[in-house]
Amino acid sequence: MSFTRSGGLAALVAGLLLLAGCSAVPAEKLAGQPGIGVLAQKGAIEVENVAITPDDLVPVAEPTRISVAGLVSNMPVEPQGLDARGQMALPVSPSVAGWYRFASAPASRSGSTVIASHVDAIGEGLGPFAQLRNVPVGTEVTIVDSAGVTHVYRVTTIERIEKEVVPWNDYFSTAGAPRLVLVTCGGEYDPAVGSYDDNYIVTAEKVS
């Protein structure tokens, strides 16, 4: 996942998030994932269904708020798709997190619910996800969805990984037990490329 900064502060997914601030996941990283295919044509991104499952036919309750015990309180979450570069889009403000809407939702029976945010931004300073580097294993994370349901997770790992080698396919998987993946930027900021060197990635298992 990669993050680039707007004007010199942060974004999310070049490995996963490349935006103005951190960065997004390149289209080629997402192509082939169950349920979506991504084609870049003349600068426009087209998303086409390539496989339909029963879950795809059920309205999805989107995550709307996230809290990380002792670190992040009631942070707004907005659904995000791909930007014009074929990367995961992110809200401009680091005070708002983005949920990758082509992956799993909190109520999905399998796969990763991916939520990411810029670590900082010019004029706003550090955002709530800057605290992810300090989250202890075992910390409780709660997500409230648009149906009013609260989903509870427990942190199992926290990793700092160089953006160029992040295994994004693993983190964006729609297979396996339900889990939560949180992403932001970290490491040194390189003003020459407008990006941080690393991503902080927190994974959490679904409790209820």
Image (spheres, helix red, strand yellow):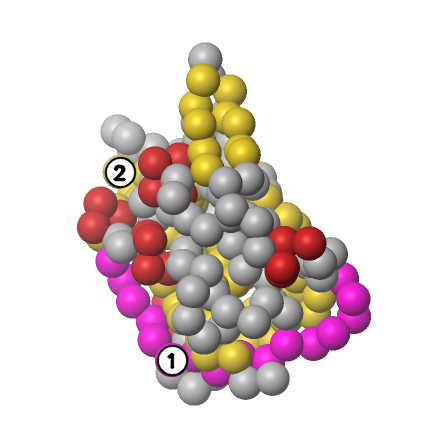
Q: Residue furthest top?
A: 42
Asked if residue 74 lies left or right of residue 12, the reply is: right
What x and y, as percent, mark residue 29?
34, 42
Residue 148 appears in which quarter of the rendering? bottom right
Report whether residue 38 is seen: yes
- Earlier in the chain: of badge 1 and badge 2, it is 1
What x and y, as percent, mark residue 98?
57, 51
What x and y, as percent, mark residue 26?
37, 37
Which image quarter is the C terminus in?
bottom right
Q: Relative to 134, say whether 172 is above or below.
A: above
Asked if residue 167 lies left or right of residue 40, the reply is: left
Residue named by callout 2: 190
- Real-space CA distance between mark 1 and mark 2, rounded to the nearest whole angstrom: 30 Å
Give the crowd class for mark 2: few <14, some 14-19, many >=20 residues within 10 Å.
some
Report the front residue among 103 and 201.
103
Regarding mark 2 in the picture, which secondary structure is present there? strand
Q: What amino acid type should be assigned to the residue bearing mark 1?
A: Thr
Give the crowd class for mark 1: few <14, some 14-19, many >=20 residues within 10 Å.
some
Residue named by callout 1: 156
Please report the residue visible at 63 percent of the width from the left and 54 percent of the height from the top. 56
Magenta part of the chain: 146-161
Prevailing secondary structure class for the magenta stretch in the rendered image: strand
1 vs 2, front mark: 1
Residue 7 appears in which quarter of the rendering? top left
Q: How many marks?
A: 2
